[in-house]
Image: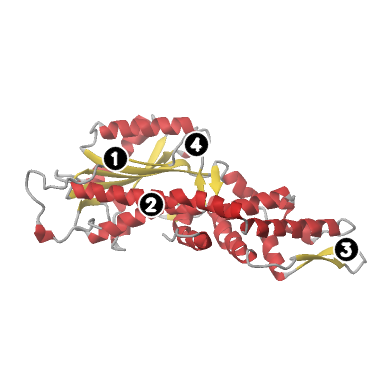
Amino acid sequence: MNLSDDHGALDAMEGAIPSFLAASLASDEHGVLTPDEEHQVRMTLVYRVKPMLEKLKKTVHDLFSVEKARVGEHKVKVTRFGGWFLRCLRSEIMDIFEMFPLSKFNPYFDTFLMAVNRHGMMLGEFHIRTARGENVPHLVNRLNQCVGEIRQEFLSPDFRRRLRDYRRPIKKNYESLMQYFKRLFGRHSRMMIIRLDLSYKQQYRRGMTPETVIQHRQAMLRDLNAGTFGPMQGYAARLEMGMRKGYHSHWVIFFDGNGNWMDTEVAMQIGQHWDKVITEGIGSHYNCNARKERYQEKNICFLGLIHHTDGDARVGLEKFAKYITEPDELLRLSVPGIRSLWKGHASEPPSRPRPGRPRSPGKGDSQWLS
C-alpha cells in the first residue's frame, strides 16, 4: 500500500478501488456477483468524481462565465472541464449521502461534497445548464466561488493534516493484521483457515441497530473462544454497512491444524450457528470455503488446511488484509464507540524451540519470517 505522503493520496485510492467496488456486489447462492444501485453510486465516486478532483486540483481558470442567449437573456457558459464538474452534481451526489450516512469520506471527497452542498449546487447539472435570466450572473459567481474554495482547501495545511489523520489508521491496520498473521504462523506450523461473510436476511437489515450488531458479534466470539467448533487459534473481522447489505462482517478464523478437519463443514456449522442461534433466525451467511476454486484459480488460496511454508497462502492473506483495509481510502464506517476492524491477540513466537516434534525442513522454508 502506497501510504507514504500526502501527494500520493489519490494514487493510493486507486489501489483501493477493486475491493471498494467489490464490497457493494452481492453474491447469489452460486457465488455470482450482481451489481445494484449502491454499486453504481460507488462507480460514480471512483470513475467520475475522483478523476475530476484529481484534475481540478491542478487547474486555475474559471470553469463558468455569463453568456447572452439568443433572446437576449443571460445563460451559463460552461467550459469543457466545467461540464465534467457539473456531471458530478447529478442525482448520484445526493445518493452518496443517503447510502453512506454512517460513513466518513476521504478528505478529497468530503471537501467536494461539503462545498457543493454549502453553495447550493445540489440543484444539479440540468438546472444550471438551463438557467436563464438576471439571476445567472449570481449563479455563475457561486459556481466559480465553489470551485475556488475546493482548490484552496486542497492546497491548505489544514487539508494536508486532515488527510494524514484520515489515512494513518489505514496503514496501521494493514500492518497490524499482517503482523498478527505472522505471529500466528510463528506459533503454529499449520492451521485450518475459515473465511465467512456474516450478515442479516434482507427483510431485517434496515431495522438493525449498531448495538444489536455488536451484541451478535460478541456472542459469536464467545462461542468461538469456548471451542464450540474446535480449538480456535485466532481471528480477524471487519464490519461494514451498505444500503442493500445493511450491516455485515467479513471474518477469517484460524483453527488448530492438527486434527482431521473438513474446513467446508466447519465453516457451514459456524454459518448456521450464526443464522439460527446467534441471530435467532434473522441472520444469513456466505461460506467462502465452499468455493475455494475461486481463489485456487488465481493461486492465492489461503482457505482450508494451510502450512506455514505455503507461499500462495501468504499472498492470499496479504490480499485479504488489503481487501478489508484498503476501501477505507475512499470511505469508512464511522459509528461513535464502535470499531470496524477487530482481531484476536497473538504473542511473539518463542525465541527457543518448544518441546515436541520440530517443524519438518523437508516442506520448505517458512513464508512468514519477513
> Residue 27, how many percent across, how many down?
42, 51
- Residue designated by label 1: 345
Foreground mark, 2 or 4, reads 2
Foreground mark, 1 or 4, reads 1
- Residue pictured at 36% horizontal, 35% vertical: 275
User: Around disc 3, counting alpha carbons within 10 Å, would you say few (fewer than 14), some (14 to 19), or many (20 or more)?
Assistant: some
- Residue designated by label 2: 174
User: Around disc 2, counting alpha carbons within 10 Å, would you say few (fewer than 14), some (14 to 19), or many (20 or more)?
Assistant: many
- Residue designated by label 3: 74
Q: Alpha carbon of mark 3 to alpha carbon of mark 4: how far?
A: 51 Å
Please tell me which of labels 3 and 1 falls first in the chain.
3
Quadrant of the image containing the N terminus: bottom left
> Residue 150, how many percent across, how many down?
67, 57
Q: Residue furthest front?
A: 157
Please tell me which of labels 2 and 3 falls first in the chain.
3
Any part of residue 24 in sight: no
Q: Alpha carbon of mark 3 to alpha carbon of mark 1: how far?
A: 66 Å
Q: Which mark is residue 16?
A: none
Q: Is residue 184 left or right of residue 238?
A: left
Q: Name the kind of residue labelled 3 in the image.
A: His
Mark 2 residue element: helix
Mark 4 residue element: helix
Q: Name the kind of residue labelled 4 in the image.
A: Gln
Q: Name the kind of residue labelled 1 in the image.
A: His
- Residue designated by label 4: 203
Q: Is residue 16 left or right of residue 150?
A: left
- Residue pictured at 47% horizontal, 30% vertical: 211
Foreground mark, 3 or 4, reads 3
Any part of residue 280 in sight: yes
- Residue pictured at 51% horizontal, 38% vertical: 335
Please tell me which of labels 2 and 4 falls first in the chain.
2
